[in-house]
């Protein structure tokens, strides 16, 4: 940070050795970069050094657990080679939602202390999104999750929600508090609710 400080467990983030800091975080972005390798290798990417001490069966269990948590496991089983299926450069053989769910599996396999999901549900349907979020809540109770999203459904159960408008903080609170004091949040919520109702009618 250029000003002030970011604290983790009360300690300035700059006091942590960079490798320890990076190994403590999991990150899934809106447009994940996938490689022309197997699904298994793409999920393991970035965590190889953490998995190399495990035996093949333990690695398989961790990959399966991460995939089930991100609700991509069933999709993977439909591919001819399962987890050994080769995907094209940048994951062109997968749908947008599958790419994002694979990226979430990649971020949780490392069992991070801080999980950052940067608009990583934008191509995932709302029903699957809800299933993933519910499973993440159960499995990640002891960690900090930072979720960036324009979808109210994604963040409405968060402990703290920060509403940002044109690069500035407009309001801070939980869902019920923001529904009372933030006009931006209220308008966004009602527009999205109306949009979902129209989709159901169609």
Image: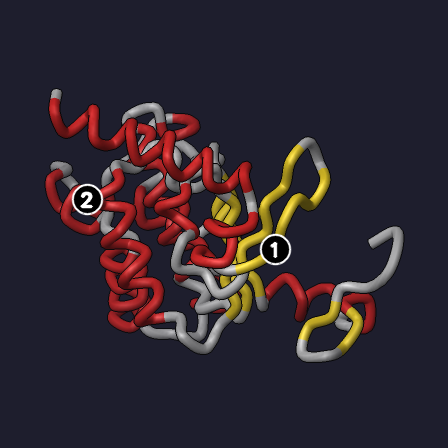
As displayed, is residue 15 above or below residue 152? below
Q: What scheme was used to colour the molecule?
A: secondary structure
In the visual, does 22 lie left or right of 77? right
Along the line of sight, which residue is nearer the eye, 169 or 10?
A: 169
Q: Residue at x 54, y 55 (%)?
A: 161
Q: Is residue 178 visible?
A: yes
80 left or right, relative to 139: left
Q: Position of residue 165 (x, y in %)?
A: 64, 35
Rendered residue at 55%/50% (across/down) = 181
Pick whichever of labels 1 and 2 is earlier in the sequence: 2
Q: Nearer the viewer, residue 101 or 174?
A: 174
What residue would you read off at disc 2?
76
Q: Position of residue 201 (x, y in %)?
A: 12, 25
At which x and y percent is residue 197? 21, 31
The outermost residue toward the right is 3
SS at circle 2: helix
Q: Which residue is mark 1?
A: 172
Question: Whole-percent x and y of residue 24?
Answer: 58, 68
Task: Give the alpha-carbon distance from disc 1 to disc 2, as whole Å.
Answer: 39 Å
Q: Is the Cβ of the residue at disc 1 closer than 8 Å to that at disc 2?
A: no
Locate residue 23 relative to residue 127 in the image: left or right.
right
Q: Is residue 82 above or below residue 175?
A: above
Residue 63, can we see it? no
Quarter of the figure that contains the C terminus:
top left
């Amino acid at each position: 940070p250029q000003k002030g400080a970011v604290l983790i467990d009360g300690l300035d983030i700059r006091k942590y050795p960079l490798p320890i800091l990076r190994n403590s975080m999991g990150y899934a972005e809106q447009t994940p970069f996938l490689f022309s390798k197997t699904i298994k290798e793409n999920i393991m990417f970035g965590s190889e050094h953490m998995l190399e001490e495990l035996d093949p069966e333990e690695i398989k269990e961790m990959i399966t657990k991460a995939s089930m948590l991100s609700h991509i496991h069933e999709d993977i089983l439909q591919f001819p080679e399962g987890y050994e299926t080769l995907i094209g450069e940048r994951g062109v053989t997968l749908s947008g939602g599958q790419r994002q769910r694979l990226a979430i599996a990649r971020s949780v396999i490392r069992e991070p202390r801080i999980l950052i999901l940067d608009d990583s549900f934008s191509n995932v349907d709302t029903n699957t999104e809800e299933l993933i979020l519910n499973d993440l809540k159960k499995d990640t109770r002891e960690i900090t999750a930072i979720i960036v999203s324009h979808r109210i459904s994604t963040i409405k159960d968060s402990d703290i929600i920060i509403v940002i408008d044109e690069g500035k903080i407009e309001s801070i609170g939980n869902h019920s508090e923001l529904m009372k004091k933030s006009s931006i949040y209220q308008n966004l919520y009602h527009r999205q609710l109306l949009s979902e109702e129209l989709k159901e009618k169609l």
